[in-house]
Image (spheres, helix red, strand yellow):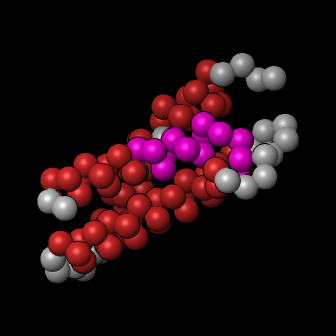
């Protein structure tokens, strides 16, 4: 896999992972359905777990392409901001725009 393809794969995974907690009512997309709705706390926990998964997949891909670089706190701060930015459409759809049943 080329580095360009790996980059786009990670961006796509981050976008899907950031919106997944807000677009379904199941815990971690496969667990039991929360009735009547998932709370914001569950959604934020899922967002953190998916963010950690994206970072882990990125490190795995980086290791297969070449040498794994050490990351400082700045990398993780940017990753957290990226996940929050990517989650904005799902957040708006699930909690602000969609009519509550």
Is residue 11 covered in magenta?
no
Q: Can you say whether 59 is above or below 83 in the image?
A: below
Residue range highlighted in magenta = 14-27
Residue visible at 31% across and 72% down? 59
Foreground of the two, 77 or 19: 19
Q: Position of residue 57 (x, y in %)?
A: 37, 67
- Seen as rendered, the residue at the extreme right is 35
* Helix, strand or loop: magenta stretch: helix
Residue visible at 55% across and 53% down? 47
**How many marks do you count on the picture?**
0
Camera sees residue 69: no
Residue visible at 15% across and 77% down? 66
- Seen as rendered, the residue at the extreme front is 1
Foreground of the two, 99 or 76: 99
For residue 80, what is the image quadrant? Answer: bottom left
Quadrant housing the N terminus: bottom left
Q: Is residue 70 left or right of residue 88?
A: left
Is residue 24 covered in magenta?
yes
Q: Position of residue 71 (x, y in %)?
A: 27, 75
Q: Can you say whether 60 is above or below 3 in the image?
A: below
Q: Is residue 71 left or right of residue 35?
A: left
Quadrant housing the C terminus: top right
Camera sees residue 13: yes
Residue visible at 60% across and 46% down? 21
Q: Position of residue 88 (x, y in %)?
A: 48, 36
Q: Can you say whether 82 is above or below 99 in the image?
A: below
Q: Position of residue 9 (x, y in %)?
A: 30, 52
């Amino acid at each position: 896999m080329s580095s360009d393809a790996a980059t786009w794969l990670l961006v796509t995974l981050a976008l899907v992972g950031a919106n997944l907690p807000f677009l379904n009512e199941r815990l971690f997309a496969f667990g039991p359905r929360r009735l009547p709705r998932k709370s914001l706390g569950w959604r934020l926990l899922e967002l953190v777990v998916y963010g950690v998964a994206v970072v882990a997949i990125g490190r795995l891909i980086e290791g297969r392409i070449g040498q794994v670089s050490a990351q400082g706190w700045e990398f993780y701060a940017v990753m957290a901001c990226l996940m929050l930015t990517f989650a904005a459409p799902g957040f708006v759809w699930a909690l602000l725009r969609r009519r509550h049943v």
